[in-house]
Image (cartoon, rainbow, N blue to C red):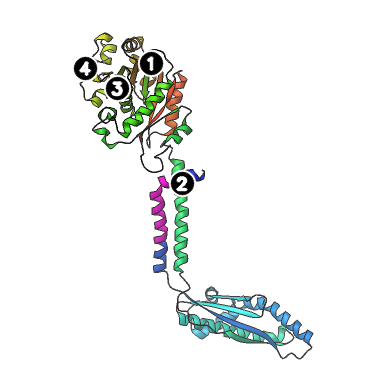
Amino acid sequence: MDFKQTIRVIRRQWIPVVVTILAGILAAIAYVAVAPAQYTTQTKLLLEPTGGTGTAQELVAGNNLLVQQVGTFTQLASTPVVLQPVIDELGLDTTADKLADKVSVASVGLSALIAIEATADTPEGAVDLGNAVAASLSDQIESSGSSTSPAAISVSVVQEPVAPASPSSPNTILAILIGLFGGLAVAFIIVVLAELLNTRVRNGRDIAKATDAAYLGRVPAERSLSRKPVPSLTAPSGRFAEAVRIIRTKVVASISASTAPVVVISSPGLGDGKSTIAANLAVALAEGGLQVALIDGDLRSPSTARLFGIRSKAGLSNALLAGVAPESITRSEVATGLTVITTDAVEAGTSDVLSSERTNAVITALAADVDIVILDAGPLLANSDGLALSEVADGYVVVARAGRTRADELRQAVDSLEDVGAEVYGVVLTAAPVRGADARD
């Protein structure tokens, strides 16, 4: 996933990204609100050899040995030898092991300085704990000096503990930053998983990944389609009609047949918008000066009559099943140069009917009087009706719906056409987003 793809994914999934980040920040704020405050003080001790009367070299050697021993003394500070007297002095209800978590002792660089950090629930408690640990550790160091070094060790406090004005934890800024970056990390995981699990096509890039078929273009999502399903007729200057004109140009350029080509419009599944594309493409072709016949060949679920608001009379089903002559089929002229041939729903045996010689003969006869035939067919994967028309088709336009058609469904639909030797002019994307990450291909 490159940078541009990442940006598109974030734009597409911005709601879960924002929600997750806010959740991380709110969780951090909640933690700060309920976490008990802790206060930390620092005390510094200076270790010096005393009682030495040797030469300068001996004094230097003694100092060096003392510096080496500082590490041992810092380790000693976390043992019961030092901490149990502190517990007894302050009357703490704890153990030496637990108290060790409240005390941090370390040497200051390569020196004889020891820094003690003591943490308690109150500023005064931190001061008392720091003083008590410093005193207990000093006693242990001074008592060990006579046996561990040539000279005794003197311990002095060079930095007294001061009651802190603000708690050392929880650190509000740090907690919020952790919540922010934690939310970002979780949001990134969610976005990546959403992209990996969501295989639906949303733009031309997705279609290009799914199939080698040409991408003919997109038509935008229109809320008014339920009321006015043929914008190319009712709103010819709108963005939907203009998008269909672009598709018309590409379809015409793809046609190699010299006389009255039959262009079948189909889709992988139901509800992808194939009938809407067929109707509007037919209008756009007629608008371009061609004589067009739009035939409803979806015998299981015909919709062309409803789209144009006309009554279904003697149509394709009558010619195929009742023996009505092609010239007797009712043709409804819905626009200049465009005639519509409807059909009644057929309950069973549609695939056998559509693949018959009778269908081939009827479609050929209907194409004789026009420049081009647009044939609205059934879906390719729901049943075999769409494939059954491959014998009469010069080429197919496959319709995929943005956010609904899966990439594997589109690939399977195109492959099924190629398997039977049908020419695929390309793929059209319907209900394409007009805003957001997928507004452009």
Secondary structure at badge 2 equals helix
Earlier sequence position, callout 4 versus callout 3: 3
Camera-nearest residue between 355 and 1: 1
Of badges 4 and 3, nearer the viewer stands: 4
Label 4: few (<14), some (14–19) or many (≥20) C-alpha neighbours in 10 Å: some
Earlier sequence position, callout 4 versus callout 2: 2
What secondary structure prevails in the magenta region?
helix
Quickly name the residue at label 2. Answer: 7
Quickly name the residue at label 4. Answer: 313
How many angstroms separate mark 4 from mark 3 (CA)? 16 Å
Magenta region includes residue 23: yes
Instruction: Provide residue 297's location: percent of width, then percent of height.
Output: 31, 19
Secondary structure at badge 3 equals loop
Camera-nearest residue between 29 and 329: 329
Can the viewer see residue 199?
A: yes
Camera-nearest residue between 151 and 320: 320
Earlier sequence position, callout 3 versus callout 1: 1
State the residue at coordinates (36%, 42%): 435
Label 2: few (<14), some (14–19) or many (≥20) C-alpha neighbours in 10 Å: some
